[in-house]
Image (cartoon, rainbow, N blue to C red):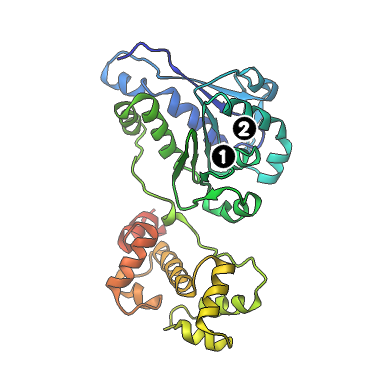
Amino acid sequence: MTNAQPFKVIILGFDGVLGSALTGALDLFSFAGVSWQRFLGLRVEPRFSVQIASVDGLDIRCSNRLVMQAHCDIGDVAHCDLLLIPTIGDSVDKVLAQNLSLLPHLKRLADTQADIASNCSGAFFLAKAGLLDGLIATTHWGYASKFKADFPLVDLQENQFVTQSGNIFCAAGGSAFYDLALLLIERYCGREISTQVAKTQIVDSKRGNQNSYTNVKLYRSHSDQLVQRVQEFIEDNFDQPIQVSDLATMVNITPRTLNRRFQTCVAMRPIEYIQAIRIEQAKRLLESGDVTIKSLADQVGYSDLSSFTRLFKRATELTPKEYQNKFSRLSI
């Protein structure tokens, strides 16, 4: 075991932060080099020195009304190895507006070449500070549309659990922070320590992406009434055979024009939209638990179970049975 100085981690505290994200980050990094060693009777050697920093060192009022005491003033942090921005638990716009004074500190610490990482909606802080312009990033799927509208210069990859652009990292929604934390612990301490943390915290370190968690809204916030009409038809008739050529005939345009207008408004082709609607309905049926896998494909408009299963797994990274076992309300 090395006797090197622990890496310095600063967790940004602000009013409206999600309490579990704040304390979860504190726990994961604080117990690297500690929990595993205690369990095995080895010498404890913390790998990270972790502090919560807020503006002027003031107390932090979390979104769950828990009041947390900061360890230090963010203005006094001249350098750190890693700066973490946890999830915004309250209204994103409200929290950003109330915490604009944090943005210069993000930029200042970014200039020191510190690693900077956000979880979930914490990415809005990075984007607001201009630190994500031209870079790949991710956030919770539920915030994807807003994020793209607010920060069009960011290459948002909302299906990714974790992204990295140089020294800037982003994690997707909720517990995706665990994936980010394990990646960062491995970055600083190596795979062995990261694996130890995963085992002691009972964290699955290879969970893929967040597609299986997405509740597809399918992007209907546009003004093209023709496309909206086609979308509504698909949503009302997804369990029936649907041909793109028939959809085009229904609205008196060519299939090529329909494809182009769909791409512009919905960021997918009509056939992809049909598939997405069917997959989403399949997920809801599986979550209810009141469906057999054999009958599922037919209920969402597919006559071939094997081809439907391939499409479902491509969209969620889980087979229908695996999804049902994971998310069915009857299995809870």
Q: Is residue 149 visible?
A: yes
Q: Which residue is mark 1?
A: 87
Residue 289 drawn above or below residue 89: below
Image coords of residue 164 (percent x, y): 46, 40
Q: Residue at x 31, y 58 (%)?
A: 322
Q: Nearer the viewer, residue 88 or 80?
A: 80
Q: Residue at x 57, y 41 (%)?
A: 132
Residue 221 drawn above or below residue 5: below
Q: Amino acid at mark 2?
A: Leu
Mark 2–mark 1 distance (CA, rounded to whole Å) = 15 Å
Q: Is residue 316 left or right of residue 51?
A: left
* Tags 2 and 1 touching, CB below 8 Å: no
Image coords of residue 288 (percent x, y): 42, 64
Q: Amino acid at mark 1?
A: Thr
Q: Which mark is residue 66?
A: 2
Q: Secondary structure at mark 2?
A: loop
Q: Nearer the viewer, residue 246 or 53?
A: 246
